[in-house]
Amino acid sequence: VTSRPEFLARIRAAVARAPARPAGLRAARPAAPAAAAEIIRRELSERWPETLERFRREFERVGGILYRVASSREVPGIVGGIARERDARRLVTWHPGALGVDVAADLAAEGLAVEVMPPADLEDAAGQAALRRVVASADLGLTAVDLAVAETGSLVLLSGYGRPRSTSLLPPCHVAVFDRTALVESLAQLGVFLEAWHADGAPPWRGGAINVITGPSRTADIELTLTRGVHGPREVHAIFVESPLRG
Amino acid sequence: MSDANLATPFRDRAGAALKDTFLQEALTIATTKFIALRREAFGEFPEGEALRDRAKAIKEATLGRLDHYLEQLIEAVEARGGHVHYATTPEAARAIIVDIARQAGARTVVKTKSMATEEIELNEALLAAGVTPVETDLGEYIIQLAGERPSHIIAPAIHKTKGQVAELFARELRHEVAADPEVLTRIARAELREKFLQADMGVTGANFAVAETGTVVLVTNEGNGRMVTSLPRVHVAVMGVEKVVPSMTDLVVFLAILARSATGQKLSSYTTLVQGPRARGEVEGPEAFHLVLLDNGRVAQIAGPLRESLACLRCGACLNVCPVYRQIGGHAYGYTYPGPIGILLTAMQHGPESVRDLAHASSLCGACLDACPVRIDIPRMLVELRREVDERRLAPWPERAIFGLLGRLLGRPALYRLAAPLARAFQLPFTRGRTIRRLPFLLGRWTRTRDLPAVAPRTFTERWPELAREDREP
């Protein structure tokens, strides 16, 4: 077994042996990432309609379906409609604290069997196993969105308290709710938020995983024929709410 | 290398591939499509060129302080409660992972597609230890059922037609189905969903690892990377030491060019960033996280002639554009990594003697350099490998003798002027028009698969006075 000091010593020696090379231009890092992220948010809050349009274009290109509603009161109706069209009944949702809106009762009124994810850790293994069975047999998964990247049509989801990783993964249909505060223009801007989330801008509830989701699960492994829903969802829907969710 | 394939010489493996009509059709369809997708993706992305330069600069800067960035990565992973292991050889890496599986009491291991685990031949080791490895990438799953090895870095089953996959599923899974990718995919989904939910351990590679935050980054389209890192109790990530990038700002530069180069997508469906085991307050995610750092010839090249190839992102773009890969496919190369970059990685991992023939499996046309997202000068290194193969006298003696003679001839103008008319006389019986189709005796090996241009009726030197005159009198 090689130890860490031995392993690193060999690398250090190799690095020292290598002739010095000119360093090319690298991307500039934000000095204060949380502040830089806040500036991006403030700038975009003025012109969110254009960013949303660009997001729509790219999101639809990768196979997503976007809905735009005036207020969060319309969300259960949209989700109910998606469910009815697909004969879907069982829905799992992030905890209202993570979702930014409490729609469980209204979704139940739409005829859905709703399972709300717990706000924090289930210490007992039995509880966790039971929860997994529920998620694995659900038809729909409802989540929030931490960032929507216009350049690529991507939804960025942080795992954490009340926001399990599997809600957007195991059910065949993923529905995500977001507002203007989630919109960013580019991957470069996503980089600033990724810096912030790992520094002074880390939310206290953040878990161990960040997923950048760009359209449904897909494969082209058989004759390069595009097929959807191989392991993850076949469908990804996003509901944009015009009035801020936590307003 | 344990591949039985290597018992036959490269020339024969390539020859067999050329005669395989299924393979030829599959390769043409796939590589043509990949090339078009990539071209389109960069065509509508003018910033791409500058990002490629930037990505190359990041790789170079990281290699220049690799010890520092790895130390940072190790500390960040450990700070999040992860364990880091150090493997100099494939044997060591296998032993480490088998040991983790034993200690975790794992019976089934689900895997994402990972060239690093192919390289260390992990599946064989797990099986020998009584642990069942399950490949979950659809292409890898097909390959595993067929008992084969991947033939492309990102599309492992590129050499199989849907008809062959349907036959395979009928035989191995007892599902009689139509040769329809949609149906076949649905069957694989159902089979593998159960495995995900039951597996004790997940093994992945790493597309990147961010030093500062201790984050392992996985790029997949199917979502199996998310499954493998979310559902089992234990997650083991295996990565070559060169996969580290300094910061999240650097990471997004690579994300912007990786999928475009590989499949022509702006991003793959899932870019998954995982940091250690599940955090406090999470109901899922692994309870234990292990990172295995793999050397296997990489460290020696930090100061070696193949240093530049340590920047490789494993996107597969150089395979798709390579006129040799497009003819012979991945298996004929005989090692884990096929294609132009594969030849360099093979030399890195198995020494220059392993590429005695492979170093010549390139026309040096430069298409790989043009396609490479981090502009690795593959042709330059292939020429250097050829020189090394020659200097170490690894090539067969007739080849060395002939090229030795040719070298002496081309280096002496007087001798060359004498030889040209001789060659013209000698070639007369074998020449049709301006090409030589077949040479006699030993030389016939050269012309068995290619034509040779005939020596021209007059050499350039003989024509020069005339050409110069024409130039003066327009």
Image: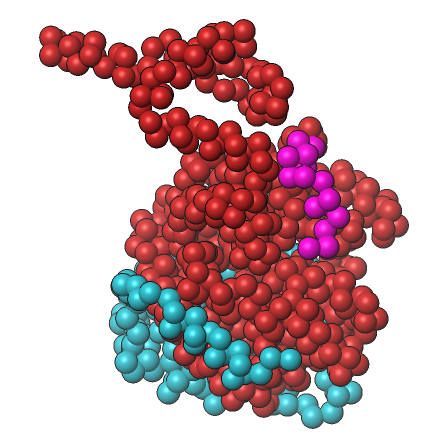
Q: Indicate whether residue B3 is drawn in magenta.
A: yes
Secondary structure mostly seen in magenta is helix
Q: Specify whether residue A19 is in view.
A: yes
Residue B235 in the image, given as x and y percentages of width and height = 65, 76
Residue B318 in the image, given as x and y percentages of width and height = 49, 45
Image color mode = by chain
B312 lies left or right of B122:
left
Say which colour chain B has.
red
Which residue occupies the foreground of this view, B19 or A46?
B19
Residue B427 in the image, given as x and y percentages of width and height = 49, 11
Residue A126 in the image, given as x and y percentages of width and height = 78, 87
Residue at x 66%, y 63% (from the top left corner): B120
Supply the letter of whichever chain is cyan.
Answer: A
Q: Specify whether residue B26 is in view.
A: no
Residue at x 33%, y 77% (from the top left corner): A37
Which residue occupies the foreground of this view, A176 or A146?
A146
Quadrant in which the N terminus of chain B appears: bottom right
B179 lies left or right of B60:
right
Q: Is residue A165 above or below residue B470?
A: below
Q: Indicate whether residue B393 is drawn in magenta.
A: no
Q: Which residues are magenta?
A: B1-16
Which residue occupies the foreground of this view, B281 or B339?
B339
